[in-house]
Protein backbone atom coordinates (compact mmCIF):
# COMPACT_ATOMS: atom_id res chain seq x y z
CA UNK A 1 0.00 0.00 0.00
CA UNK A 2 1.36 3.46 -0.87
CA UNK A 3 1.46 6.36 1.55
CA UNK A 4 -1.48 8.08 -0.15
CA UNK A 5 -3.74 5.05 0.09
CA UNK A 6 -5.45 4.17 3.33
CA UNK A 7 -6.76 0.78 4.32
CA UNK A 8 -10.33 0.14 3.30
CA UNK A 9 -12.84 0.79 6.04
CA UNK A 10 -16.56 0.58 6.28
CA UNK A 11 -17.01 -1.22 2.97
CA UNK A 12 -14.92 1.25 0.92
CA UNK A 13 -12.17 -0.11 -1.27
CA UNK A 14 -8.75 1.52 -1.30
CA UNK A 15 -9.55 2.81 -4.82
CA UNK A 16 -12.71 4.54 -3.59
CA UNK A 17 -10.75 6.30 -0.82
CA UNK A 18 -7.76 7.27 -3.00
CA UNK A 19 -7.54 11.03 -3.51
CA UNK A 20 -5.62 10.88 -6.80
CA UNK A 21 -7.02 10.97 -10.31
CA UNK A 22 -10.76 10.84 -10.89
CA UNK A 23 -12.29 8.06 -12.97
CA UNK A 24 -12.70 10.58 -15.82
CA UNK A 25 -9.03 11.58 -15.63
CA UNK A 26 -7.92 7.94 -15.65
CA UNK A 27 -10.16 7.32 -18.68
CA UNK A 28 -8.62 10.33 -20.47
CA UNK A 29 -5.13 8.95 -19.84
CA UNK A 30 -6.16 5.58 -21.26
CA UNK A 31 -7.57 7.34 -24.32
CA UNK A 32 -4.30 9.23 -24.76
CA UNK A 33 -2.27 6.01 -24.65
CA UNK A 34 -4.59 4.51 -27.28
CA UNK A 35 -4.25 7.66 -29.44
CA UNK A 36 -0.45 7.44 -29.32
CA UNK A 37 -0.52 3.79 -30.41
CA UNK A 38 -2.96 4.53 -33.22
CA UNK A 39 -0.90 7.50 -34.41
CA UNK A 40 2.30 5.44 -34.48
CA UNK A 41 0.65 2.80 -36.68
CA UNK A 42 -0.77 5.22 -39.23
CA UNK A 43 0.32 5.39 -42.83
CA UNK A 44 2.15 8.75 -43.20
CA UNK A 45 0.28 9.45 -46.45
CA UNK A 46 -3.15 9.27 -44.84
CA UNK A 47 -2.29 10.30 -41.27
CA UNK A 48 -3.76 13.82 -41.45
CA UNK A 49 -7.05 12.70 -43.00
CA UNK A 50 -7.30 9.78 -40.58
CA UNK A 51 -6.67 12.06 -37.59
CA UNK A 52 -9.35 14.49 -38.76
CA UNK A 53 -11.78 11.60 -39.21
CA UNK A 54 -11.04 10.55 -35.61
CA UNK A 55 -11.78 14.09 -34.41
CA UNK A 56 -15.06 14.25 -36.33
CA UNK A 57 -16.08 10.83 -35.00
CA UNK A 58 -15.34 11.94 -31.42
CA UNK A 59 -17.39 15.11 -31.96
CA UNK A 60 -20.29 13.04 -33.34
CA UNK A 61 -20.32 10.98 -30.11
CA UNK A 62 -20.83 14.05 -27.90
CA UNK A 63 -24.18 15.00 -26.37
CA UNK A 64 -26.09 17.51 -28.50
CA UNK A 65 -25.12 20.70 -26.64
CA UNK A 66 -21.40 19.86 -26.66
CA UNK A 67 -21.53 18.48 -30.21
CA UNK A 68 -22.95 21.73 -31.60
CA UNK A 69 -20.21 23.75 -29.90
CA UNK A 70 -17.46 21.32 -30.97
CA UNK A 71 -18.63 21.35 -34.60
CA UNK A 72 -18.49 25.15 -34.69
CA UNK A 73 -15.09 25.24 -32.98
CA UNK A 74 -13.79 22.69 -35.49
CA UNK A 75 -15.09 24.79 -38.39
CA UNK A 76 -13.61 27.99 -36.95
CA UNK A 77 -10.19 26.48 -36.24
CA UNK A 78 -9.85 24.67 -39.57
CA UNK A 79 -10.88 27.74 -41.56
CA UNK A 80 -8.96 30.31 -39.49
CA UNK A 81 -5.76 28.30 -39.02
CA UNK A 82 -5.54 25.64 -41.74
CA UNK A 83 -1.92 24.96 -40.72
CA UNK A 84 -3.13 23.45 -37.44
CA UNK A 85 -3.72 19.72 -37.81
CA UNK A 86 -6.77 18.17 -36.10
CA UNK A 87 -5.98 15.30 -33.75
CA UNK A 88 -7.34 13.64 -30.65
CA UNK A 89 -5.66 14.59 -27.38
CA UNK A 90 -6.75 12.76 -24.23
CA UNK A 91 -9.97 11.94 -26.04
CA UNK A 92 -10.65 15.59 -26.91
CA UNK A 93 -10.63 17.33 -30.30
CA UNK A 94 -7.36 19.25 -30.53
CA UNK A 95 -5.40 21.18 -33.13
CA UNK A 96 -1.63 20.92 -33.38
CA UNK A 97 1.34 22.56 -35.06
CA UNK A 98 4.28 20.22 -35.75
CA UNK A 99 2.68 17.57 -33.53
CA UNK A 100 2.32 19.89 -30.51
CA UNK A 101 -1.21 20.79 -29.38
CA UNK A 102 -2.00 24.50 -29.66
CA UNK A 103 -5.70 24.44 -28.74
CA UNK A 104 -8.36 21.94 -27.77
CA UNK A 105 -12.07 21.58 -27.07
CA UNK A 106 -13.17 19.92 -23.84
CA UNK A 107 -16.82 18.94 -23.67
CA UNK A 108 -18.72 19.58 -20.45
CA UNK A 109 -19.72 15.93 -20.35
CA UNK A 110 -16.12 14.63 -20.45
CA UNK A 111 -15.25 15.73 -16.91
CA UNK A 112 -18.84 16.34 -15.76
CA UNK A 113 -18.50 20.12 -15.62
CA UNK A 114 -21.20 22.70 -16.16
CA UNK A 115 -19.65 24.19 -19.31
CA UNK A 116 -17.49 23.19 -22.24
CA UNK A 117 -14.04 24.73 -22.58
CA UNK A 118 -11.82 26.01 -25.37
CA UNK A 119 -8.28 25.69 -24.07
CA UNK A 120 -4.86 26.78 -25.29
CA UNK A 121 -1.55 25.13 -24.49
CA UNK A 122 1.79 26.79 -23.87
CA UNK A 123 2.43 26.29 -27.62
CA UNK A 124 -0.17 28.99 -28.38
CA UNK A 125 1.21 32.43 -29.11
CA UNK A 126 -1.16 34.20 -26.74
CA UNK A 127 1.35 35.58 -24.24
CA UNK A 128 0.34 39.08 -23.21
CA UNK A 129 2.28 40.63 -20.35
CA UNK A 130 2.44 38.62 -17.14
CA UNK A 131 -1.14 37.32 -17.08
CA UNK A 132 -3.42 35.94 -19.81
CA UNK A 133 -6.20 33.35 -20.02
CA UNK A 134 -5.45 29.87 -21.29
CA UNK A 135 -9.02 28.57 -21.37
CA UNK A 136 -12.48 29.93 -22.04
CA UNK A 137 -15.82 28.61 -20.83
CA UNK A 138 -18.36 28.06 -23.59
CA UNK A 139 -22.10 27.84 -23.14
CA UNK A 140 -23.21 29.02 -26.59
CA UNK A 141 -21.54 30.53 -29.62
CA UNK A 142 -22.85 33.90 -30.70
CA UNK A 143 -21.48 35.77 -33.71
CA UNK A 144 -19.34 37.90 -31.36
CA UNK A 145 -18.00 34.82 -29.57
CA UNK A 146 -17.16 33.14 -32.88
CA UNK A 147 -15.30 36.27 -34.03
CA UNK A 148 -13.33 36.36 -30.76
CA UNK A 149 -12.48 32.65 -31.08
CA UNK A 150 -11.33 33.20 -34.65
CA UNK A 151 -9.05 36.03 -33.51
CA UNK A 152 -7.67 33.94 -30.63
CA UNK A 153 -7.01 30.93 -32.86
CA UNK A 154 -5.36 33.10 -35.52
CA UNK A 155 -3.07 34.63 -32.89
CA UNK A 156 -2.41 31.27 -31.18
CA UNK A 157 -1.44 29.64 -34.46
CA UNK A 158 1.14 32.37 -35.04
Image: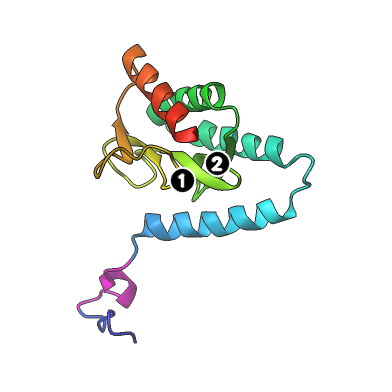
Q: Is residue 24 above or below residue 148?
A: below
Position of the N terminus, as image quadrant, is bottom left
**Residue most toward the top?**
143
Q: Is residue 128 above or below residue 73?
A: below
Residue 2 appears in the rendering = yes
Q: Where does residue 42 sit, x and y in percent of width and height? A: 74, 49
Q: Are marks 1 and 2 in contact (CB under 8 Å)?
A: yes
Where disc 1 sits, the SS reads: loop
Q: Where does residue 102 sit, x and y in percent of width and height? A: 48, 41
Q: Is residue 110 above or below residue 79?
A: below
Where disc 2 sits, the SS reads: strand
Q: Which residues are magenta?
A: 10-20
**Residue most toward the left?**
10
Residue positioned 31% across, 77% down in the render? 14
Q: Main secondary structure of the magenta part?
A: loop
Q: Nearer the viewer, mark 1 or mark 2?
A: 1
Measure how far apart labels 1 and 2 are at the Cα level. 9 Å
Identify residue for label 2: 96
Q: Is residue 15 magenta?
A: yes
Q: Which quarter of the picture shows residue 155?
A: top left
Q: Identify the mark at residue 123; answer none if there is no mark.
A: 1
Residue positioned 51% across, 48% down in the render? 89
Amino acid sequence: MTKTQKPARGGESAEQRFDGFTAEEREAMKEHAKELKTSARRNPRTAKADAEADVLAKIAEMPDADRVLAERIHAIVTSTAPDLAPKLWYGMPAYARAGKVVCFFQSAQKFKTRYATLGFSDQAHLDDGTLWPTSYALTELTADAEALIGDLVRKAAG
